[in-house]
Image (tube, helix red, strand yellow):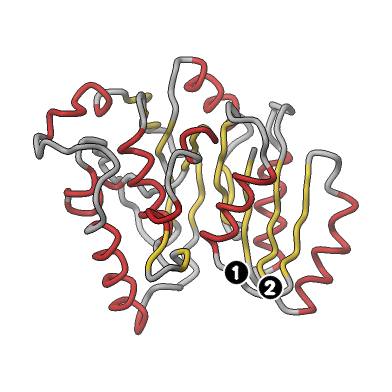
């Protein structure tokens, strides 16, 4: 199941995201498009677009903004009912690269993966992130486990307690990818890195500029949360999983 989220996304970018999914050779997928309390104009655009999407799609409009984490939790835990389903996250203003992304993910999960990370092409800079699964919470940059493309089994996500996804009793609304990916990496049996660039990431600018300090403070609180496994402080603890790399 592919979960797309967005709020007041430029229509051209939303169409690009949708078309990149529709272009996949594999057809055994479903998608949930969450319009998070957008303006009346954008909401009407999505409503007009919906009939053309086909039976694979479920479109949900929230009357008020709920935030990315709250929507993700709701979609995975209540819309998807198969614990073995593979969840793929796709921001509504980004896109998949190529028509075989889902084929490549399928092959990795057939090999026993329960979570995958990577890789992405950024439009603002050319950079490769080195992923480290072992003790990611305690590494600089969170082991880069937050990067696109993110996918995981529903049953793995469902093992995360809500408290690990919340601050001050509310679902995290900034840097939420850090919260759920760090938690799942700690629970995963066979996380894998995909080196090939499968995801086009076009930064929106949110969390930058004046928001940078707030975002960094929230990330600091996320990484300070107790890990979901009993850490030995030894990076070799998950050495075998950190070696699971697909090129």
Find the distance from the CA under tag 2 to the CA under tag 1: 7 Å
Q: Is residue 246 above or below residue 163?
A: above
Compare residues 236 and 82 and report the one nearer the observer. Answer: 82
Are the residues tagged 2 and 1 within 8 Å (C-beta)?
yes
| Percent position of residue 206, x then y | 45, 73
Label 2: how many Cα within 10 Å (few below 14, some 14–19, many 20+): some
* Left or right: residue 5 compared with residue 239: right
Q: Is residue 182 above or below residue 229?
A: below
Please give the label number shown on residue 66. 1
Q: Secondary structure at mark 2?
A: loop
Q: Residue at x 58, y 26 (%)?
A: 84
The N terminus lies in quadrant:
top right
Read off the residue under disc 2: 37
Please give the label number shown on residue 127. none
* Left or right: residue 21 compared with residue 169: right
Q: Is residue 147 above or below residue 236?
A: below
Q: Secondary structure at mark 1?
A: loop
């Amino acid at each position: 199941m592919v979960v797309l989220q967005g709020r007041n996304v430029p229509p051209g970018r939303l169409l690009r995201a949708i078309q990149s999914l529709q272009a996949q050779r594999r057809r055994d997928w479903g998608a949930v498009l969450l319009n998070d309390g957008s303006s009346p104009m954008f909401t009407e655009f999505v409503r007009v677009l919906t009939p053309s999407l086909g039976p694979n799609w479920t479109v949900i409009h929230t009357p008020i903004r709920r935030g990315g984490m709250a929507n993700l939790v709701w979609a995975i835990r209540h819309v998807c009912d198969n614990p073995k389903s593979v969840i793929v996250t796709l921001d509504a203003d980004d896109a998949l690269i190529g028509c075989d992304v889902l084929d490549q993910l399928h092959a990795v999960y057939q090999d026993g993966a329960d979570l995958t990370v990577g890789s992405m092409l950024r439009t603002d800079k050319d950079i490769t992130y080195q992923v480290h699964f072992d003790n990611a919470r305690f590494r600089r940059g969170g082991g880069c486990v937050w990067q696109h493309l993110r996918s995981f089994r529903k049953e793995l996500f469902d093992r995360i307690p809500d408290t690990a996804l919340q601050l001050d009793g509310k679902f995290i609304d900034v840097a939420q990818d850090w919260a759920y990916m760090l938690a799942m990496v700690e629970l995963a049996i066979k996380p894998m890195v995909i080196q090939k660039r499968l995801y086009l990431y076009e930064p929106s600018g949110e969390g930058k500029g004046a928001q940078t300090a707030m975002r960094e403070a929230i990330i600091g609180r996320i990484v300070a949360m107790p890990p979901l496994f009993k850490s030995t402080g030894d990076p070799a603890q998950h050495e075998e999983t950190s070696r699971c790399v697909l090129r």
